[in-house]
Image: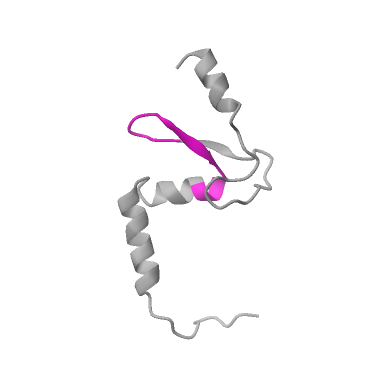
Amino acid sequence: MTWDERQAIVATRTDACQCCGKVPTNKYGTCLDHDHGTGDFRGWLCHQCNTGIGSLGDDLDGLRRAIAYLEGAPHISPVIPHK
């Protein structure tokens, strides 16, 4: 990547996470997200979204499995009551 290409990516940095829409409250702000296979820049994410996507395998199949799990999870009374 050339210096100009890097600067063009940095110029697109957003305050809000492009995944959840929240503005990070840590001192680092949004972080650069990239495809680990190609190295291609994807966008700017908060730490939670960036690590969450990575924990799910950094691919659509992992996210689809998580969605299927949440959609199919039984809706029963919580084990720990809400306060």
Instruction: From this view, report whether residue 21 is shown above or below residue 12.
Output: below
Instruction: Check the image and tell me how it is coloured.
Output: one colour
What residue sits 35% from the left and 67% below the top? 69
In this picture, residue 1 sits left or right of residue 13? left
Residue 48 falls within the magenta-colored stretch: yes
Instruction: From this view, report whether residue 17 is shown above or below residue 8.
Output: below
What residue sits 37% from the left and 61% below the top? 66
Say which quarter of the image contains residue 36: top left
Q: Nearer the viewer, residue 40 or 80?
A: 40
Q: Nearer the viewer, residue 3 or 8?
A: 8
Image coordinates for residue 29, horizontal then vertical, percent: 64, 40
Image coordinates for residue 77, horizontal then vertical, percent: 48, 86
What residue sits 54% from the left and 14% below the top? 4
Residue 43 falls within the magenta-colored stretch: yes
* Part of the protein shown in magenta: 34-49
Q: Quadrant of the N terminus?
A: top left
What residue sits 37% from the left and 45% below the top? 58
Q: Quadrant of the C terminus?
A: bottom right
Say which quarter of the image contains residue 10: top right
